[in-house]
Amino acid sequence: MTHPAGNPLDLRAWLDTARQLGELKDVPGADAKLELGAISEMNVKIDGAPALLFDEIKGYPKGFRVLTCSTASPARLSSILRLPVEHAHHALVQKLRGLPRQWQAAAAKYEPVAVEKGPVFENIQSGKAVDINIFPSPLWHEKDGGPYIGTGCCVVTRDFDSDWVNVGTYRVQAFDSNHVGLDMIPGKHGAIQYEKHMQAGKPFPVAIVIGCDPLGYLISGIEVPFGMCEYNYIGSILGEPVQVVRGELTGLPIPAAAEIVLEGWCHPGDRRKEGPFGEFHGYYPGKEGDAPVVTIERVYYRNNPIIVGSPPAKPPNDYSYSKAVMRSALLFDALLAAGVPDVASVWAHEIGGARMFNVVAIRQRYAGHARQAALILNQCGVGAYMSRYTIVVDEDIDPSNLQEVMWAVATRSDPEVDIDIIKRGMGSKNDPMFVTYRSDAPYNSKAIIDACRPYDHLHDFPAVAEASKQLQAAVREKWRDLLKL
Ligand SMILES: Cc1cc2nc3c(=O)[nH]c(=O)nc-3n(C[C@H](O)[C@H](O)[C@H](O)COP(=O)(O)O)c2cc1C
């Protein structure tokens, strides 16, 4: 369904869809302090687990809710991406192939549309009345530095010297009734815009959307090109523009049906200790850091507001599945854009947080093809940050199947010639291995493992000892009951 004045990114419309699909479960009575986080973390590890909508949260009014695990299944993810609902993982990956390229190419056509009113303005707190403690911000993990109101959120900011609006997902720690901390890693688009304001000694305007249609944080949490507004990219997926209202204070665009929005400023020099926080790779990397503080001057929220939570943890976690699917599609497109031919498939594994352990399968066409594919996968814009192991396999190996990938590594690579190391690559202070780095600058080293059959021995490489596809099909047909197919 399209909306005459654009799509307001209404979470509740998507919740109806998820409920109809049998993909949503109501959970009354949990405690926002640790219990809600642990339930979500354990739920997401169960095959076929639903999204969870927590209500009657201990100490908070009925109706003040938290949603988790929203993107963690093929059916939920395909419905969020407005694709035909897919219950099987491989079918979803197949449907997504090539789409990010098309969405990006068409994004300029989908400028957000501003309207005067929206459900987000049903309740407004202003000035001294601002109190974010009315919302059930979860303490997600035992060693976290405090409750985090923003995980599955969209942080809307504006550039200093252009009208570029960026929307990024950065965690938001609730400090007190009107202050939050914003953890933007250097180089992220929001961080670049923040730095420009600080260098000019000017306050940095921020509007933090704590919950809307999960398409919002799905896209603000991936690497949309520098200078492009995520609202345009989202509009391109929806096939209609995003409908926004303007924040009263900053004029920043906010989805008209957002659940909760915190609006305010980061003032020059105002930073506080932030974290630690359990991270997407499964560790608390380091101690608390130092992050910009947002002083909140307005809060807008819907009646019975819903926080969209997406807590990271040791994978698989709340968003590792959706990141694996989305980043694999982006990496596939990046390889094609760089001119690598005959890429069969790419998979950014959940075990590496969809960043640190990536595999590409190719149909080898020439000597050097395998190394080319692996190096570009490892170094392209979407792939370079925190990449550690990159493996290239032949097209008979399914790159998303770790058993097959490691069989290829064990049997088709010669460590002496098939492992290359790239030194001083793009790492992160968030890397658990940062403790061993010899420099304070976050370089890392990266290994490429060429687990393809050697190109110059394709003709005489030993044949695979496995029943042929035809034999398997015939036996499957005849022995269906025995083989439980
Ligand atoms: C749930 C979730 C939480 C995230 N938390 C952070 C964070 O705290 N800091 C950060 O820099 N990136 C975080 N990311 C990754 C960024 O959202 C991602 O790199 C995105 O591309 C940043 O937007 P930008 O490219 O516009 O800067 C998170 C992603 C997700 C999905």
Image (tube, rainbow, N blue to C red):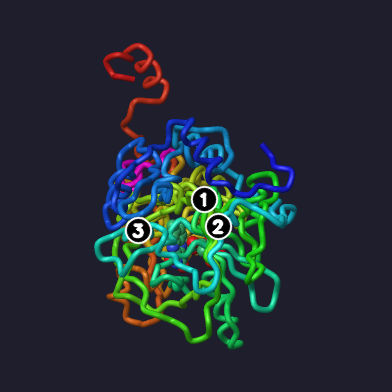
Which mark lies nearer to you, 1 or 3? 1
Q: Earlier in the sequence, mark 2 or mark 1?
A: 2
Location of the C terminus by quadrant is top left
Residue at the disc numbered 2:
123
Direction from residue 19 to residue 140 in the image, left or right: left
Residue at the disc numbered 3:
138
* Residue 345 drawn at (x, y percent): 49, 44
> In front here: 36 or 412?
36
Q: Amino acid at mark 3?
A: Pro
CA separation in Å, label 1 and label 3: 20 Å
Whether residues under marks 1 and 3 lie with C-beta atoms below 8 angstroms apart, the answer is no
Q: Amino acid at mark 2?
A: Asn
Q: Amino acid at mark 1?
A: Asn
Residue at the image position 32 percent from the left and 77 percent from the top = 437
In the rendered image of this protein, does residue 413 appear above or below residue 126?
above
Q: Which residues are magenta?
A: 396-409
Which mark lies nearer to you, 3 or 2? 2
* Residue 161 drawn at (x, y percent): 68, 78
Residue at the image position 47 percent from the left and 53 percent from the top = 370
* Residue 11 drawn at (x, y percent): 53, 46
Q: Residue furthest top?
A: 478
Residue at the disc numbered 1:
303
